[in-house]
Image: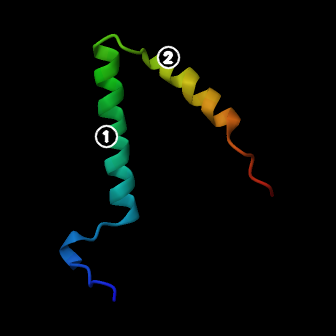
Amino acid sequence: MAEKLDAKEIVTAEELLMSEVIQSEALINLLDKKGIISKQELLEEMKTIKAKLPKKST
């Protein structure tokens, strides 16, 4: 049987997305500050990955 969720622990999709954005930005900034990867390198990698994703059919 499913367990009932506590309403205080439920977050909206917008809150979840914002949390992911903040975490990603923090990691990117730290990697850049430490000289591990530049923001430009990250953008290039993101473009590479995006190009490999299946295209949406319309």
Helix, strand or loop status at disc 1: helix
Numbered tag placed on residue 10 in the rendering: none
Q: Is residue 56 left or right of residue 34?
A: right
Q: In x, y percent, where is residue 5?
A: 26, 79
Question: In the figure, 41 relative to 24: above or below?
Answer: above
Identity of the residue furthest to the bottom in this view: 1
Residue denoted by label 2: 40
Q: Is residue 28 above or below residue 50?
A: above
How far is the residue under mark 1 from the one under mark 2?
19 Å
Q: Residue furthest front?
A: 1
Decide if residue 37 is on the left or right side of residue 9.
right
Residue at (28, 83) in percent of width and height: 3
**Earlier residue among tags 1 and 2:** 1
The amino acid pointed to by label 1 is Gln
Q: Amino acid at mark 2?
A: Gln
Q: Which residue is mark 1?
A: 23
The quarter of the image holding the C terminus is bottom right
